[in-house]
Structures are given as C-alpha cells and as structure tokens.
Amino acid sequence: MYKQLKRLRVITSLTFLVLLTLAILDVRFGVTFVGKLLVETQLVTAILVGAVGWIVLWVVLTLSFGRIYCSTVCPLGTMQDASAWLGVRCKPRDKRRYRYHPSVNAKRLPIPIIVGICLFLGFTTVVVCTDPLYIYNKMWFAALHVTTIALGSLLAAIIAFLGLTAVSFWRGRLICNTLCPIGGLLGLLSRNPIYRVDINTDKCIHCGKCEDVCKSECINLRTCVVDNTRCVMCMNCCEICPNDAITIRRGKYRLSTPLMRRAMQCGNSDNFESATEITESK
C-alpha cells in the first residue's frame, strides 16, 4: 500500500512542479483560471490574496495528516527531494544513509514568528521574499535573463540554487526544516496530527532501514519516536520497513508487551537502558 501511496505523492509533486513552472514561464498560461488556481495553492500566496478556502484546506490537512503540503505542492520541496534522490545515488556508499539529528528549534521557531510579525505590520516584502514559490520564480527568471538581469539579483539566484541543491544533496530536507518559515509554521501545526507516522515497537527489529532513508532525519530509533514536526510524509520509511513496524496510523502505538519487562528477560543491561528511554518517550 505504501509503495502506491508514495508513487502517488511523487506523481502529484512532479505534476505541481511542472504546472507551476509552466505558469512562471508562459504568461498566457499563468493568467488562465488554472494557472491562477495553481499559484493560489501556495500558502504564502493564499495568505497574501486572502484565499480563505485554500488556507483553511491546508490547515485542516496539516492538522489531520501532517506536512503533506511540503511533499506535494511546494516547488522548493520537490527540488530538495530531487537533489536528495541524486545524492543517494551519487554519493559514496558509506555516505548514502541519513542519520537522526535533534530538532534545531532555536533556529526553526523565530523565523515564522518574525515573518508573521512582518505580515501583521504590513511589511509584505519580507513575507514575499521568504515564499518558496517566489524564490523558485526568481531562480527561473535569473536563468532566462542571465544577460540582462542585475548582477546582485543574478548572484542571489545562483547562491540560492547552489545552496538549496548542495544542502539537500547531503542532508535531505535540512533547509526545509530549519530555514523555511512555511515549514516552521506547518511544523507547529503538525506536532500532534490525527494520522501520523508511528513505530510499532512490538514489531520493530531495529534494522535501521527507516532511519537510513528519512530525508528529514527525524526518526530516532533509540527511542522509537518520529518527530512529526519535521516529517514531511514522504513515506520512504513506511515503504522500506521489512516488518511493517512503521506505518501511518491514528494516534500513537501502545505497547502490548512492556519493553522494560522484555529487556529484563533478555538480561541485557544496555537493552534495559534503551527500553527505559523508549517507555518514557511513549
């Protein structure tokens, strides 16, 4: 099932990327009803033009399923996924795996707060300049007008493109989860979604495959906890799990066999310490 869901997500994200690119490159398509509708699906645009329907839809979807916005309709998100995909295939074999890293809340939280204050005060320029669609648009604009664009704008576009692709090549969704104000805002809303990626610790064999493919680096196998504020619902982990231990489910999984008891039966002190941490986290 997750293989088909992941395939649907990839097709959706590529479709949005192609159509948004077409709306940027072809003015005639951009001013059509479909072109305008595509642009309004972008959260910053919806907020600025007052498209209440799209705002409500994305809030409801995020509260229900987490950050699917970031993995389906965000053009920079799709660019990061493409670069991460290349990274897995081009990096040395011992460098292809992702590893869990704690959330950097000190960097994540202030950015959406500052952008929100700027929006409230009417400083829309700051808001627009942090919009993923605007950044994506400027990259294309610089590429198409490389001989006539101002040097400063050209350098900014080049730095943005190289920085985005290089970081995502090595660290997946790091920029999405640290610098993007939309990612930070949706992360706050997806702290406790109705349906979430969760680990069945009765089935988990700690093979590490889910952590290896997690582009958001948000799966902590030591405690068997998924940081849903950073998870973008790419479903890589659900697809690769050999024992169906990691799934999208409603609420958190409750142990049928207490891990502390299981570890004590094994008589392994290291397992006992790990089990204690897992039980406390649950």
Image (cartoon, helix red, strand yellow):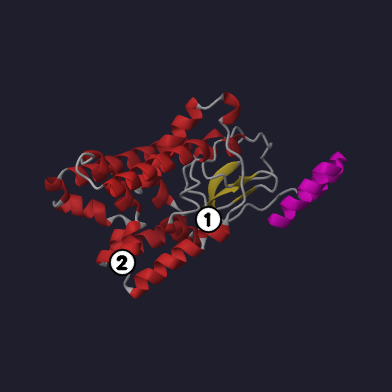
Task: Tell me: residue 25, above or below residue 254.
Answer: above
Tell me the residue that label 1 is attached to: 229
Query: Which is in the foreground here, disc 2 or disc 1?
Result: 2
- Residue 207 x %, y %: 66, 34
* Residue 200 lies in quadrant: top right
Query: What crowding class fits label 1: few (fewer than 14 Cα within 10 Å), some (14-19), or many (20 or more)?
Result: many
Residue 32: % across, % down = 13, 51
Magenta stretch contains residue 67: no
Residue at (18% x, 50% y) in the render: 34
Q: Residue at x 31, y 66 (%)?
A: 124
CB-based contact (under 8 Å), mark 2 and mark 1: no
Q: Is residue 176 left or right of residue 156?
A: right
Eyeballing the image, is 210 above or below 35? Answer: above
The image quadrant that residue 64 belongs to is bottom left
Badge 1 element: loop
Q: Identify the residue at image location x=34%, y=63%.
A: 127
Query: Residue type at mark 2?
Result: Thr
Q: Amino acid at mark 1?
A: Thr
**Disc assigned to residue 124:** 2
Q: Residue furthest left?
A: 28
